[in-house]
Amino acid sequence: MVVDWLTGARLRGDMDEKYHGYFFMLDVRRAKREQSWRDGDNTIFCAVRKLRQLCESLHIYNYILYRIGGDEFVLISDEQGTKKLAKKKELLLSTFRVALEKKQSTEPWIDALDRAWLKLRGS
C-alpha cells in the first residue's frame, strides 16, 4: 500500500477494483492556485484531518480514503457509513465540493470517478 506523504491517504493507483460500495468524490474548496504551495498543502492537510475527525465522531471506521489528484479525494465506505456522512452534507460542503455515487459491480472505477468528477464540475 502506497500512501500520500502529506495526508496519509492511499494513492489512486492503489485503488482496489474489487471494492463495491458507495463513495464521495471530494474536492477541497479552498486549495486555490493563488495560494503558495505551503498554504495550499496546509489547506489540504487540514481538510483531510477535518474529514477524518468527522468520520471518527460519526463512528465510521470502515472507510478508505484515496488521494486521486492534487486536491481531489475519494472516500469509500459501506452504505451505513455513507448514509451517516450524507446527513452531514452541509458540513462537508463547507470544506469540500461533494459528489456521491454508488459504484455498480460491473462498472470500472474509472467510469464511476469520471461521472462523479463531471457532477462536481457541473455544480
Image (tube, rainbow, N blue to C red):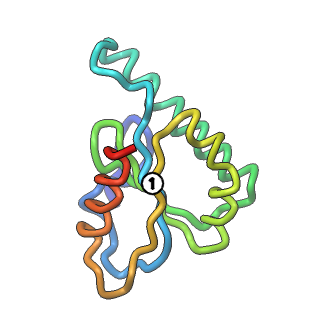
At x 74% / y 59%, what residue is drawn?
Answer: 59
Relative depth, front residue between 25 and 123: 123
Could you tell me which secondary element the residue under label 1 belongs to? strand
Q: Is residue 69 above or below residue 118?
A: above
Task: Out of 23 and 119, give the one closest to the viewer.
Answer: 119
Q: Residues within 10 Å of mark 1 (few under 14, many from 20)?
A: many
Q: Quadrant of residue 19?
A: bottom left
Q: Residue at x 61, y 37 (%)?
A: 50
Q: Quadrant of residue 41?
A: top left
Residue 15 in the image: above or below residue 92: below
Q: Which residue is at 44% across, 66% downward?
A: 101
Is 117 located above or below residue 82 in the figure?
above
Question: Residue 62: x, y in percent?
Answer: 60, 67
Residue receiving disc 1: 99
Residue closer to the observer: 32 or 90: 90
Q: Residue at x 32, y 55 (%)?
A: 2
- Label 1 sits on what residue type? Ala
The location of residue 74, given as percent across then percent down, is: 41, 55
Which percent across, then down, holds residue 17? 30, 76
Does 120 sit left or right of 59 as displayed? left
Q: Quadrant of the C terminus?
A: top left
Which of 84/122 is in front? 122
- Residue at the limit of the structure toward the bottom, as seen here: 106
Query: Taking 42 as reference, is 61 left or right?
Result: right
Residue 7, position as x, y percentages in the image: 44, 39
